Amino acid sequence: MRVYSTPRRAIVALAVAGLMGGGLVACGGDDSGDSGDNNKDAAADLAPLIVGTTDKVTTIDPAGSYDLPSWTLQYNIFQNLLAIPAGGNTPTPDAAESCDFENPTTYTCTLKDGLKFSDGSPMTSEDVKFSIDRVIAIADPNGPSSLFGSVASVEAPDEKTVTFMLKAGDATLPFVLTSGAGAIVSAAKYPADALQPDDQSLGSGLYKVDKFDKTQQVVLVPNENYSGDQELANSQTIVSYFQQESQLKTALESKEVMVAYRSLSPTDVADLEENGADKGVGIVTGQGTEINYLVLQNTKGAFADKAVRQAAAQLIDREAIAENVYNGSVDPLYSMVPEGLTGHVEAFQERYGEPDVAKATAILEEAGVETPVASTLWYTPSRYGATSADMYAEIQRQLNDSGLFDLELESAEYEQYKEEYPAGTYPAWQLGWFPDFPDADNYLSPFYDSVNNFLQYGYKNAEVDELLAAQKASTDPAEREAAFTEIQTLVAEDAPIIPIWQGKQVAGVVEGVEGVEDTFDPSFTFRFWLVKGVES
Amino acid sequence: MAARSGSLRTYILTRLALVVPNVLVLLTMVFLLMRVAPGDPVSAALGGRLPPAEIARRREAAGFDRPLIVQYWEYISGVLRLDFGQTLTDNRKVTDIFIVNGGATLTLTVAALIVALGVGIPLGLWAGRRRDSVSDVGIRLFGILTYAAPVFFTGLLAQILFTSQLGWLPSGKQASAITQATLDERTHIFLLDATLAGDADAFIDGLKHLVMPAVVLGLLITGVFIRLIRVNLAQTMRDDYVEAATARGIPEGRVVLRHAFRNAMVPFVTVLGLQVALLFGGAILTEQTFSWPGVGSQLLRYLNNRDYAAVQGIITVFALVVVAISLLIDIVNALIDPRVRY
């Protein structure tokens, strides 16, 4: 896979166009080093942006966080070698001029000229090497070191070149480098073996940290040394943290925040859609790649029998869940790979069709399963929203009403839940997933690889394992896509996990705020710089 | 001993001496309660996210592998040195949590106490003077309702009414985002920082944000104050000296305020100390409801993360503050009522 810097191409194209037109076009180039000052000057004429959220940040040190709330801040403070452009789903150069697989186990990137951290110090390939090495070395329990599992070493042969030596072919590396794990920090300012305090963060992104209190608010101001190609649409961004969804909604209605992003409850979203206009508030939705799914214990209990899993997959009515429980704020999901990502196929829809009690009965009869099948469904109300209780009541109703199941419903707080499900305590349980990066592999390997899946639920399929390894080692997009299709078909047949819904990205916005829709894409990157604030 | 000597100084010294066993029992209870849960704090906070060897290393480094009595001694000696420990999940000193977030909790509880006194005392006096009248019944009902209604429920209703519907007050937090972003934090007490900065707009903004949480929390203990003042005033009003004062033709208002009320205050002041503990408890929920950046919201965060080292440290400080306030109240009581020390 090779990715080129679009800006460089654009600059060349503009220069050619200018010359052809008889004049030389002066364009803010990457090399000038002036764009940062422009960044600051331009921002001075803009309104600030206040984003409200119920997210909980771990830390913005790239070595210590592996969660969306922390990464959302990181995307705006740090540069990566590669980034997912707004509206896209493939990596393109950010701090890199170009990145290229020299061979399946050697990936080399060349840095752009004139890169600087927000303190004005230059960014070199040593900083990139240092950043990746320290993520791996610190191996923080909350950190993303596992994402670099395929990296044998990182080398910086000269100031502008970074080479990743891989243990085996890994086509997901470019995607990993776009994630929070690949954020570039200053080797001079960050400790190699410990986390950096958040208020001393130093990156080269569009913003720098002015004030940091992860329980109250984080103030991001323009980084005057930013040398990239993006432009700010606001003078500064304040991220305001709320404890409760209801309070976030109230704050939006009273214009204390301009954008409410993650998470308004489905009820609040429906209310704002219906009545928000009276208060000058609206709802913006966009494609999301968050998924929610039901995991079935594959080695013991009622769901160890493939026929029982298939019968459950045959009966669950995702449309009803999306409409009745979530008021249409989520979409039915028929594969673990969500729609919008390359390689997505509606595998469960193709295999099972519409919910059908007769078909489910036939599956169980053919396998000689005695009905009703008794078991317990588990969910957690403290991780995926309070609506989880309603969703699982609906799933229980759908399955029990068929007469084929006799399921109890149980719940646990997430802190207890997250320890119990890997221990094999639950026969069937709810989980959700945000992407680390927008690649189908990120929705398949962590779940279906018989050795390295994090669910520890006993699923094994040698054919799936082979396909997973093959697509990961391949840098041919067509080959990978074919493997993704085959894997999804195989796991739909085995039904070790039943995908339920795919979340939309939803934000409440006050009148006058623009640009939120531009940043809603499968990468789940909230680019603050694209959003225009309003004077409060 | 105090009763025999009759001296205020002896009473205060005796009361101070009693603080030592009082604190010791309290600290022992906190220490033991934190260890009732199975496992150890490191496993609880980081279990499942670190390899067993790393868990063991951290457990050893934090001293949780040592005998209970050794841990107990370290805990007590730490408290004596004003070292309340360090959080496990984000390596913050507990004292830092109080330095950064204590000001917000102090602001909230003091404001809530002012609301409670400002509402509770006049209503208690009114009800005490007009026993069994319609207004008395109404005030008593109000007192019961405010005491019984959970803070988070009252808070939510207040937010819907005063923010969403009427648009009079902000929904929560200590100040608006822009104000917080621009104000220089020196003392971590927002109103004081605004005053020091000479920023009148920030001060007014802070006051606006304080009103709703302070009223909601204050109303929680208003009911107790109303009931106390009412009952004590009614009893005092039946005393001979009040009748005598009335018989001498002193106006009713003056009799109530200058004679009856002063005596009715003695049990009230005693109970005031106990209410501080209730205020701290209420502050935790209030801070959560209004995203108020106090110690209570931090305590909840650490509880959710099962960071028992942080929880132990915070509860210890809270407990010591309550003991100190109780001591202060006892001394004040002895000052205003000589019967206490005889």
Image (cartoon, grey):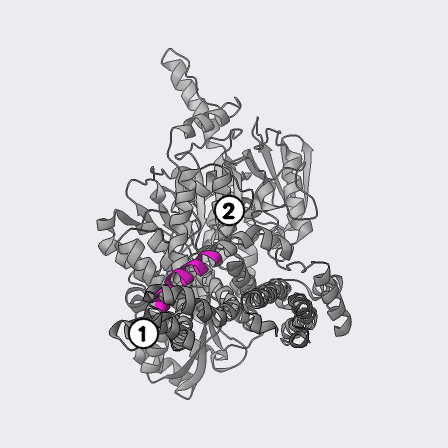
Q: Residue at x 37, y 67 (%)?
A: B256
Residue A373, quarter of picture:
bottom left
Residue A177 on the magenta segment: no
**What is the three-letter code of the residue carrying label 2?**
Asp
Q: Are marks 1 and 2 on the same chain?
A: no
Whether residue A360 is visible here, answered yes or no, is yes
> Can residue A1 be seen at all in this image of the molecule?
no
Q: Nearer the viewer, residue A237 or A412?
A: A237
Q: Quadrant of the C terminus of chain A?
A: top left
Mark 1 vs mark 2: in front: 1
Measured from the top left, where is residue B169 in percent x and y?
33, 51
Q: Quick check: is B120 in the magenta stretch?
A: yes
State whether residue B207 is above or below residue A376: above
Is residue B185 depicted above or below A295 in this figure? above
Crowding at dot 2, Cα within 10 Å, few <14 / some 14-19 / many 20+, comes out as: few
Given residues B296 and A76, the one toward you in this image is B296
Residue B141 badge: 1
Q: Quadrant of residue B176?
A: top left
Q: Quadrant of residue A526?
A: top left
Task: Name the residue type under label 1.
Answer: Leu
The label shown at residue A476 is 2
Q: Main secondary structure of the magenta part?
A: helix
Q: Secondary structure at mark 1?
A: helix
Residue B301 place in picture, x, y as percent: 53, 61
Query: On residue A532, which mark appears?
Result: none
Q: Position of residue A47 (x, y in %)?
A: 37, 34
Q: Which residues are magenta?
A: B110-125
Circle 2 chain = A
x, y percent for residue B85: 68, 60
